[in-house]
Amino acid sequence: MFSFSSDDRGVTEPYTDLPALGLAVAGLLLFGYLLFSAYAAYADKAYYADVREDLRTMSVAIAGDPSLACDGCSFMLDARKLSNASAAPDGLQGYGKAGECVAAEVAAGEYRWQIGADGGRSADYRLLITVRLNDARCLPGTLTVTSSEGQR
């Protein structure tokens, strides 16, 4: 008959609990990471859905802005006006809500113009345009307007 004090079958039991405890902790950490990444993805999608219509309106307004567009033509931007606007530090100051940074990038072939500065969390909207390099040459391109949270 075995007595409770002389039975050595349970000697290794504390050491068998450690791998199970390690697996449980790893599972909880993985669950926390997946939960956080799902929330972050949801927050980004919610922000984009919130500002998407404003971005579209700003993109159309910038494409028709007389300081960037060719005379009397919407969606056709002038390369000289783009160069002048990209040299100015606050070329898109009149666009966007208070406390919001608005930036625009125009790309046409190998030509690129950057107007404005980016901030924190952002969303962008791309619009097809034409860039007039001179009287004889025009290139198809894109206008990408980015709206960022943050101070100007």
Image (spheres, rainbow, N blue to C red):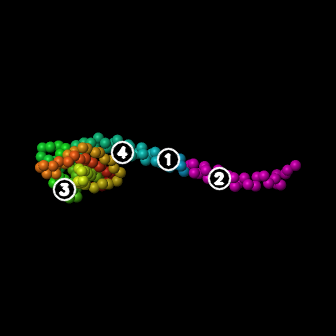
For residue 5, which quarter of the picture? bottom right
* Residue occupying image coordinates x 50% and y 49%: 33
Which mark's residue is nearer the viewer, 4 or 1?
1
Region of the chain picked out in magenta, as a range: 1-28
Distance between mark 2 and mark 3 Cα atoms: 64 Å
Label 3 sits on residue: 83
Distance between mark 4 and mark 1 Cα atoms: 20 Å
Element type where label 2 sits in the image? helix
Q: Is tag 3's residue or tag 1's residue first in the polypeptide sequence? A: 1
Element type where label 4 sits in the image? helix
Label 2 sits on residue: 19
Residue type, label 4: Tyr
Residue 118 on image: x %, y %: 30, 54
Which mark's residue is nearer the viewer, 3 or 4?
3
Residue type, label 3: Ser
Label 4 sits on residue: 47
Q: Is residue 61 left or right of residue 23?
A: left
Distance between mark 2 and mark 1 Cα atoms: 22 Å
